[in-house]
Amino acid sequence: MISQIPADTRRLLLIACTVTALVAGAIGAFAAQSVRPDCSFSVLSLTSESGSSAEQEEAIERAYWQTVAAGNCAPPHARWQFWRG
């Protein structure tokens, strides 16, 4: 069985299986990432320019989810769902 296969061939087979598993895992992780579909919305900010970037990011995030809740934008999906066409 496997003991009849030369050591170099076994090592090559083990390396090939390991690389294949790592590549499949990387592609799976990439495909499972959450992405947002294209969406346009506006955010009105009444803060000064010295306002923190974190506050601005929170306002943008809040506006995005309000737009999603209103049905004007699609919610985020796993990346692989966009590959289906």
Image: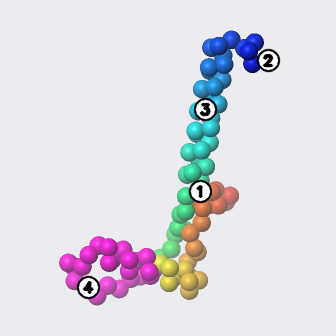
Q: Position of residue 65 (x, y in %)?
A: 50, 79
Q: Which mark is residue 1?
A: 2
Q: Please name which of the two marks, 1 or 3, marks the residue nearer to the observer.
A: 3
Circle 3 residue: 18
Residue for point 38% across, 80% down: 59
Circle 1 residue: 32
Q: Secondary structure at mark 1?
A: helix
Q: Secondary structure at mark 3?
A: helix
The three-letter amino acid code for the residue at tag 4 is: Thr
Question: Does 51 lie within the magenta span?
Answer: yes
Q: CA distance from mark 2 to mark 1?
A: 38 Å
The three-letter amino acid code for the residue at tag 2 is: Met
In which quadrant of the rendered view does residue 26 lie?
Answer: top right
Q: Which mark is residue 59?
A: none
Depicted 64 relative to depicted 23: above or below: below
Residues at circles 3 and 2 in contact by the CB criterion of under 8 Å: no
Magenta-colored span:
41-63
Residue for point 59% across, 33% down: 19
Decide: few, some or many residues near mark 1? Use Cα within 10 Å; few <14, some 14-19, many ≥20. Answer: some
Q: Is residue 2 left or right of residue 64?
A: right
Q: CA distance from mark 4 to mark 2?
A: 73 Å
- Circle nearer the N terminus (4, 2): 2
Q: CA distance from mark 3 to mark 2?
A: 20 Å
Circle 4 residue: 47
Q: Position of residue 83 (x, y in %)?
A: 64, 56
